[in-house]
Image (spheres, grey):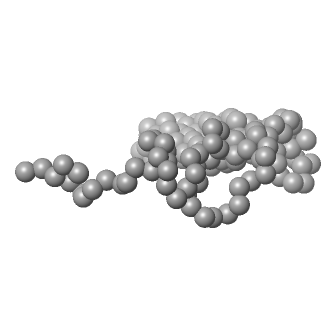
Amino acid sequence: MSNPSGPYGPGPAPGPGASGGTGPFPPPQPGARPSHGPGPAAPPPGAWERRPAPPEKGVIGALLDTRFNHLVTPKLIRLWYIVALLLISLQCLVFFFLGLWMATWDDGWAWGVIMIIACPLVWLFEALLVRIAMEAMVVRFKGVEHLRVIRDKI
């Protein structure tokens, strides 16, 4: 058998919201935030208006921003990633040519072959590590940007 008032007991009593009935609280005004009983005072009129976003600054402007409203790292992260990939590629090229040189030895040729085979794997591993670190940093800054948009809506 089922309970006509619901599986968890009777539902809430009709209040002033949907049915327009009279209760302990007056009906909500259009555009006003819902009231949940006595609490903090309502904000002054115009407090809910959207604040304009601060104007975007370049790298130098963000660097000289003493209030830290403009962040430098999101502007430089792309450059840092490119530099990191170039350094990783240069390192792997040096190891590759070192492996080629070692492969010509009579006694150490096996180490040279191992270095030649390992170079692409090392490049991939290091590139993935750098990418993961950069993405973690970007995600953190994007979260800050989204929180700023939410704050500005209030």
Residue 115 visible in the snapshot:
no
Count the marks: 0
Find residue 82 and report its horizontal and vertical position in percent. Answer: 68, 35
In this rendered view, identify the residue nearer to me: 97 or 143.
143
Residue lying furthest front in this view? 22
Residue 65 in view: yes
Who is closer to the viewer here, 102 or 150?
Answer: 150
Q: Position of residue 24 (x, y in %)?
A: 52, 59
Q: Tell whether 113 sits left or right of 33.
A: left
Query: Residue placed farthest to the left in the image?
Result: 1
Residue at image point 73% right, 44% down? 48
From the viewer's side, name the closer residue of 151 and 114.
151
Task: Place residue 73 in its image quadrant.
Answer: top right
**Which residue sits at x=86%, y=44%?**
62
Give the percent coordinates (x, y) of residue 123: 53, 39
Q: Residue 13 sits in which quadrant?
A: bottom left
Residue farthest to the bottom? 39
Residue 18 in which image quadrant: top left
Tell me what residue is drawn at x 49 percent, y 50 percent: 22
Q: Residue at x 7, y 51 (%)?
A: 1
Question: What percent of the width, then of the height, locates residue 134?
Answer: 62, 44
